[in-house]
Amino acid sequence: MTKLLIVTGFVGAFATYPIPDKLVYNGKNFSVYLNILPDEFYKIDTVTFDSLEYINRILTVDLFGDKKGCQTTACVDFLASWEIEKNQLYLTGIYSCCYYEDSIKADLTSLFKEKVINGKVKADWVSSKEIVQGGEELNFISYDIPVFKKEIEFEFLEGKLLNINTFDNSKSRQSVYSQNAEKLLNFIYTNIDWDNLPKQKKPIRVITRFSANENGKIDDIEVTKKSENEIFNQEAIRVIKSIPDWDVIYVKGQLYRQYYSMPILFSEENRKKYGQ
């Protein structure tokens, strides 16, 4: 995944992170992203995007009867609550994405009939490994995932809890340069060797793609939009690699290589503003 840095003068976008389901285990509440019902509730389509095929699951059941639950960018169809009891996963509730405003929830009995026992349904359709929130959140999102000091992974097979794994991500950290656009821009443009660059009539825009190692050192970089003059491409690489410190992200106890895209504008305006 490549993240386009949002800094003054450039355009990018952040994705809305989805609202999690709730899971109760051993009397504790966890956040989990199960959000799936049995296959018979869906129409399964195959979607081709950029020559790759994806499975698209479309709900064909009116979960809330004659009521219409709302949808948001962070919640498409529904929210759910789950419970693990004696190592068995149960579905305990299905709710509108705006449940706390509209109080709309599904009637499990009308959906699952005799499968509902004591107000819950044995979730034997769930066979997956699910990460739940564990420990202190590090208060940042790496574009597509939240980053936690500790992650707990629950492994299910047909609703049975097979295993629990715990991962230490405490070596994750954020860089002041990724969080402060002004500081990042100032570092980049004041460290460009303007004296060794030819003057140009029109601005030259070079786009780099990079990531950092476990020490926060940028060690993987390429130019994705090049200048015809190679000297500008090499200068873009040099100045990005010289950033003193960058984000370090661990997921499931392993270094996660988050890639970032950074445009650099070589212009006479920037030369006059930042050049010494």
Image (cartoon, grey):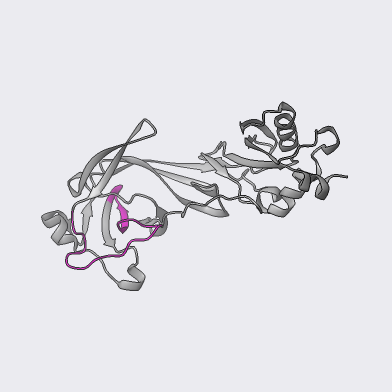
In the figure, is residue 78 to the left or right of 145?
Answer: left
The C terminus: image quadrant: top right
Question: In this view of the protein, which residue sits in the foreground, 69 or 192?
Answer: 192
Q: Is residue 269 visible?
A: yes
Question: In this view of the protein, which residue sits in the foreground, 109 or 234?
Answer: 234
Q: Residue 24: horizontal and vertical position, in percent?
A: 36, 57
Q: Residue furthest left?
A: 114
Question: In this view of the protein, which residue sits in the foreground, 193 or 83?
Answer: 193
Is 85 inside the magenta-drawn segment? yes
- The span picked out in magenta is 61-89
Q: Residue furthest right?
A: 276
In the figure, is residue 210 to the left or right of 143?
Answer: right
Q: Residue 90: horizontal and vertical position, in percent?
A: 26, 53
Residue that appears at 17% across and 46% down: 40
Residue that appears at 12% across and 57% down: 113
Vertical side of 223 occupied by 163: above or below: below
Residue that appears at 69% across and 41% down: 264
Question: In this view of the protein, which residue sits in the foreground, 127 or 79?
Answer: 79
Is 231 inside the magenta-drawn segment? no
Q: Residue 42: horizontal and vertical position, in percent?
A: 21, 47
Q: Is residue 155 visible?
A: no
